[in-house]
Image: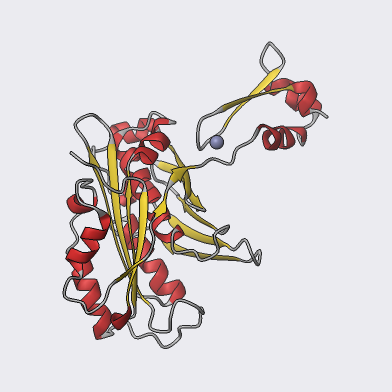
């Protein structure tokens, strides 16, 4: 079977409806990120959805050096921290969770079981201007997708539809898919969309079509992403498809950075962190790479 568009984001617009969209399919990149930690299935599914969401939103950034970060801050849930980011097509992410509590609960925990009274922070860092925008929404809906929709409606007054899903294949590998649709009647630029009407009929039509996109289709590699877009909007006069973006696993951890962080600790604390051979071994939380740093160098 031929496989299409694994680890790809595709952008499109429907000019007559003032709508733009992104469609994403993650394959090997997702498996690489998940393989860094031995996550239980419920955490794998959560991280897969978060990474897909990061790719959907991140791939809308015009500033190629810009970064999008999703961070879930939680209270009383199984998950202590979830972080994903996107920069120039590179994705990374990890979840810190309470394995004992997860094991005690059902196989498919609710969003509330995972996050408790949690919040999702969405942060945009612009490379060109150094500006940062951050919005925070409660994680009290049914899904991450719902929280993301609420973020755009509440923080940016942009009607938004998000579909996320993950499929596990017989060989144990994963494919995640996502669809992101937005109504931008004032155009893509400018953040002052004060008079956007949420009940705009053009948008309602697009959103109703988008809501019919099946998770099984998004995660079916035998169907090219462009075909999914055409099928969904085949009655529109014009759908403009943009060049696709290749997605990769990118981690920005570096031995130099870790040595710099360690150097900020007093010498006695460094000595306490070191193993018998005088090395402090630091794991990157994202990719699980281990960085052994000699105490003497860290103390410089
Ligand atoms: Zn790393």
Q: Position of residue 174 (x, y in %)?
A: 28, 38
Quadrant hosting residue 201:
bottom left
Q: Position of residue 30 (x, y in %)?
A: 37, 40
Closer to the camera, 117 or 287? 287
Q: Residue at x 71, y 37 (%)?
A: 261
Q: Quadrant of the N terminus?
A: top left
Quadrant hosting residue 256:
top right
Quadrant hosting residue 38:
top left
Q: Residue at x 39, y 40 (%)?
A: 29
67 left or right of 154 in image: right
Q: Residue furthest bottom?
A: 195
Q: Quadrant of ligand 1?
A: top right
Q: Residue furthest top?
A: 276
Q: Residue at x 60, y 38 (%)?
A: 253
Closer to the camera, 115 or 39? 39
Image height check: is 244 above or below 4?
A: below
Closer to the camera, 299 or 61? 61
């Amino acid at each position: 079977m031929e496989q299409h568009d694994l680890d790809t984001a595709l952008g499109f617009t429907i000019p007559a409806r003032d709508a733009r969209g992104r469609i994403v399919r993650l394959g090997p990149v997702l498996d690489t990120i998940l393989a860094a930690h031995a996550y239980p299935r419920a955490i794998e599914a959560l991280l897969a959805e978060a990474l897909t969401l990061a790719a959907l939103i991140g791939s809308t950034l015009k500033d190629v050096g810009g970064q999008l970060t999703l961070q879930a801050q939680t209270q009383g849930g199984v998950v202590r921290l979830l972080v994903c980011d996107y920069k120039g097509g590179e994705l990374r992410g990890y979840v810190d969770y309470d394995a004992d509590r997860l094991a005690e609960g059902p196989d498919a925990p609710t969003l509330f079981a995972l996050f408790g009274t949690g919040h999702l922070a969405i942060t945009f860092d612009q490379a060109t201007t150094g500006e940062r925008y951050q919005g925070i929404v409660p994680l009290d809906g049914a899904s991450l997708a719902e929280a993301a929709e609420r973020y755009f409606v509440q923080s940016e007054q942009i009607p938004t539809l998000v579909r996320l899903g993950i499929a596990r294949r017989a060989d144990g590998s994963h494919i995640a898919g996502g669809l992101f649709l937005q109504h931008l009647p004032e155009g893509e630029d400018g953040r002052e969309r004060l008079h956007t009407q949420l009940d705009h009929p053009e948008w309602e039509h697009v959103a109703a079509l988008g809501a019919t996109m099946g998770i099984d289709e998004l995660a079916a590699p035998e169907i090219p992403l462009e075909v999914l877009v055409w099928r969904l909007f085949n009655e529109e006069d014009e759908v403009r498809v943009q060049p696709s973006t290749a997605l990769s696993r990118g981690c920005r951890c570096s031995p130099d950075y870790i040595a710099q962080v360690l150097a900020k600790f007093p010498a006695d604390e460094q000595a306490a962190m070191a193993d018998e051979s005088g090395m402090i071994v630091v794991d990157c939380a994202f990719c699980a790479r281990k960085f052994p740093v000699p105490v003497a160098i860290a103390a410089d």
